Amino acid sequence: MLRIEVPRYPERIDGLPDKAWVLTNSERGASACPRRYWFAYIEGLKPKSTSKPLRYGSGWHEVMEAIYRHWMVHDSTCPWSVVSDAIDEVSRQWAQSESDGQLEFGEAEKETSRLTNAVLGWVETYGLDPYEDLKIVAVEKAFAAPVRARNGKLFRPEMFVVSDGDGGYRPARTGESSIAETVRWAFYQVGRLDALAVHRRNGSVWAIDHKSTVSPAQYVRGLSVDPQMQGYLWMVEQAIARGFVDGASRDAKIGGFIYDVASSGKQYDPAVLKNGQISQSKSKTVPSWRFIQKVSDLSLDVSDYEEHIAELRSRIDPKLYQREWMTVSAKGRARYGSEIFGEAKRLAGLRRSAARIVDPDLIHETHPRVPVCKSAGAFCSFKGPCSEDGELARLEFNVTDGMRWLSCDSNKPATDVVLVDPDENTVRGAERGKLGW
């Protein structure tokens, strides 16, 4: 008996068999450069420290999760105490990181201030009432869907796994095919949605994703060709048919997705001049609500600043928070199904070719660097080993197994497992509590 373990997915995932090979969007993104993919997903290198943008983004997600979870459970206005408690928890985590030496002295306080101001602006923009047309039915929900070939059959390529010595397995690394076992397990895509909602009137299902980025406007411009949310809807559509989406009927239609994009940049308070008035300088990102708050704090007459406030509302505010609603046609979702099959074939090939290598220098041929960086090492954690690989360059990384297939006691009853056809790995019904292997 095996139990699959997927990084960042501690929970059981509806529809995912234990004998499966998992594919994620993060993995697809890293594979744009074969060398980066080799470092991250074949060699299993993981940076020991978290980048500043990733750390902030995780904090932003924690706060949004608290708000959306309240909406899911209560379907009512989220109290500010829920928001402040979430900010306090993130702040505590950052303070602990600073105490452990992972952050510079004083950085936790600065980052907490940046996060707090961003959340206050989000609340000012959207409020804390739930969506008028949508009922939140899931938060941080993971989905899985099988990758199928053009003939409709599950994609089961030859892959290599290495025994962990205790009845379990991990993916083979570079040059390990000689000590590996060959398996043909089906590929499944896995992803976690920030939130899922059902339309209150027509029952359609909508996916929601939170993003924090330096430039929301620039991010939104690229959404029409970004396959991430289209892929999530491709998975959700199959989950609906299998009854894995609480609050949605099995014949519910896909509505589309919502990107809730917030600026991660610092929001400033306006400066106070020596004469007691407020500076109307345009040099800093001062949103209208922070300007108005400063006017109130100083008991000044807001009518004296009406023209400047109007300019902030038209010039600054729209750059900080944007919500984009988009739809994906059935044809578009089918297209994604073809694309993910092609990606699965390509990534399976990258893993196999690395495992079969005998001469270490051949990795330069099979997993070359490609010019995808806008500047040297941009958005990549592997600048050191990419430039000159070796033991010294890898000191900043831990080695992880990625996904694993652990041995488990076959006498113990399975929990939250769907009934699966062992030959096809296709779900025949959401009969939880039964094991199909």
Image (cartoon, rainbow, N blue to C red):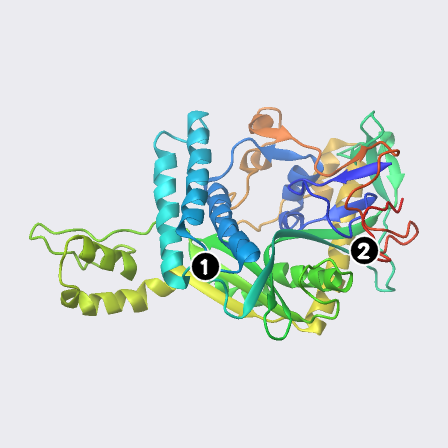
Task: Locate residue 147 relative to residue 253 in the image: left or right.
Answer: right
Q: Residue at x 25, y 51 (%)?
A: 269
Taking the view exactly as shown, the residue that stands out farthest to the right is 423
Q: Amino acid at mark 1?
A: Thr
Contact flag, marks 1 and 2 (Cβ < 8 Å): no
Q: CA distance from mark 1 to mark 2?
A: 34 Å
Q: Amino acid at mark 2?
A: Ala
Disc 2 is placed on an element classified as: loop
Mark drawn on residue 305: none
The foreground one among 377 and 398 is 398
Q: Residue at x 54, y 37 (%)?
A: 383
Quadrant (top left/top right/bottom left/bottom right) for the C terminus: top right
Up-down: is 313 above or below 78?
A: below
The residue that label 2 is drawn on is 430
Q: Earlier in the sequence, mark 1 or mark 2?
A: 1
Q: Residues within 10 Å of mark 2 (few under 14, many from 20)?
A: some
How far across and how far down the image is residue 77, in percent? 45, 59
The foreground one among 128 and 13 is 128
Q: In the rendered image, is residue 356 in sight?
A: no
Task: Locate residue 380 relative to residue 171 in the image: left or right.
Answer: left
Up-down: is 393 above or below 307?
A: above
Up-down: is 316 above or below 186?
A: below
Q: In the rendered image, is residue 221 in sight?
A: yes
Where, by quadrant of the figure, is residue 317 drawn?
A: bottom left
From the viewer's perspective, is the residue at label 1 or at label 2 nearer?
A: 1
How far across and how far down the image is residue 101, in percent? 44, 26
Mark drawn on residue 77: 1
